Image (spheres, rainbow, N blue to C red):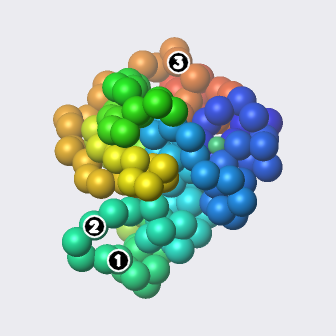
Amino acid sequence: MRCYCGLPTIFKQCCEKFINQSKIPETAEQLMRSRFTAFKLQRFQYLVDTYQTKLPLKTSDFDTSIQWLGLKVIAIDRGEKSDSQGFVEFVAFYQSVKPEHLGKFEQLHEKSYFEKIDDKWFYINGAPLVKIKLVRNEPCFCNSGKKYKKCHGV
Ligand SMILES: [Zn+2]
Ligand SMILES: [Zn+2]
């Protein structure tokens, strides 16, 4: 059993404690992963609470027609417990639930920037990057346990 963020730990022992706000992420990666899980579960309040921006979002600003399929963390630059800034590069896979998009998926490849403010990590902004090439023989991004070519790559 994997968490929605892709780590080999069940949700209850991984992202849930952060989304419930009973624990605070210690690293930028933990925040990034738990934000992905919150997107997936449509726990929009957590996304609002962990996003530091001049124009605050409302939970109603989020698009509920998107279904998040999986996450691949590619690189981490700082963002450890002792840091106050950090970057996480990732690819998030998603599909629209609108009928005309069924069976198609998209990817968001981004380098996100995080900052620690008063001992709490926040998402600040992200730079979009070009799409990655998917390898047919690698495990599929959706955590089905199948190879990409036998799952979403069909
Ligand atoms: Zn997780
Ligand atoms: Zn798949």
Compared to 94, does 43 lie above or below? below
Secondary structure under badge 3? loop
Give the mark, 3 or 1, whose residue is nearer the N terminus: 1
* Residue at the disc numbered 3: 138
Q: Check disc 3: other Cα within 10 Å, few if <14, some if 14-19, many if 20+.
A: few
Compared to 127, does 53 lie above or below? below
Is residue 70 at least partly visible in the picture?
no
Secondary structure under badge 2? loop
**Label 3 is placed on what type of residue?**
Glu
Secondary structure under badge 1? loop
Compared to 144, does 74 lie above or below? above
Q: Is residue 102 left or right of residue 8?
A: left
Callout 2 touching callout 1 (CB < 8 Å): yes
Residue 55 % position (x, y): 24, 76
Work out which residue is located at the far front of the displayed protein and give it. Answer: 118
Is residue 60 at least partly visible in the picture?
yes
Q: Quadrant of residue 99?
A: bottom left
